[in-house]
Amino acid sequence: MVSGLERIKSRFKCDIDDNLISQIYALLNSDKFTDDTSDYIEKSVEEEILETHIKKNDLFFNDLRFSIYLDEGAEHKVFFNDAESKVIKLNDTIFYVNWSQYFESLLVHNILFPETKYELLGFVKINEILYSAISQDYIQPSAKTNIEFVREYMISKGFTIKKRNDYIHAELGIIIEDLHEENVLVKDNTLFFIDTVIYLK
Amino acid sequence: MSTEKLKPYQLFQDLAEKQRIVKANAKKTTLEEARAIIKWLKDGKADKKERPDLEKLEEQIKKP
């Protein structure tokens, strides 16, 4: 069974950078934790594996104090680091069945949207909830997003509308959800996909 | 024009090229500007994915 990073590389016909996102994804998908019949691990089990790894490798992100709280959405708490012109987002993976699926979403986002790629800075624990801390270049929109334009663009790329702001590319087996006006920004007539929820079929 | 089929990772390649140019010309944003933009963006029109209610989900799972 082909699993983990090899499956994504093969699906997208590309290499994947060696960074903390790919390393954590590889860890969660390693043979140690999966079996021959399934690569699914329950979220709570993955969280135990992850926390052990975080503690062992000192992956707690302690520099949030250099950033200032900006906003909060359904899945992210957003902070702004104006010195570096970056946003830092804390995510508790609420939209994903497990941490693997979340990291898979980040990996695919970085493949498809390299100019708004995420960098995994580490992890934060608040009130016993584990969050990833990811950073991304800040994009200052110059106009409000016309959602019809996003729809037309996605359709031009072979996607069909699944529902509302969710899209599916049947041939490639990619689902990209939550592409609403605050997650796809417009700057100088160019779309920027800053928040995506991606699932592979 | 090349008729070579794009590989899956190149699906949004056209966008990335434009984005690189836009980003190269972008000016730095201050915290005050970022806060003002958030206010301006959030006009309540966006049809967003809602955060699932975990308690309800757990109850549904428990029901036979």
Image: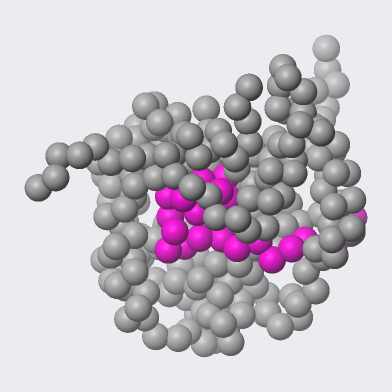
Q: Residue at x 76, y 31 (%)?
A: A31
- Residue segment shown in magenta: A105-129
Which image quadrant for residue A181?
A: bottom left
**Looking at the image, residue B63 lies above or below residue B33:** above
The reply to whether residue B51 is in sight is no
Classify residue A19 by image quadrant: bottom right
Q: Is residue A93 left or right of residue B62?
A: left
Q: Residue at x 43, y 74 (%)?
A: A140
Q: Residue at left 63%, top 30%?
A: A3
User: Is A93 a magenta residue?
Assistant: no
Q: Give residue A43's position: percent from left, percent from top.
A: 79, 37
Residue A167: image x %, image y %?
42, 37
Q: Is residue A110 magenta?
A: yes
**Residue at image point 39% right, 71% down:** A141
Q: Is residue A193 left or right of residue A127?
A: left
Vertical position of residue A51 compared to residue A141: above or below = above
Please name the colour scheme applied to the rendered image. Answer: one colour
- In depth, the one of A97 and B35 nearer the eye is A97
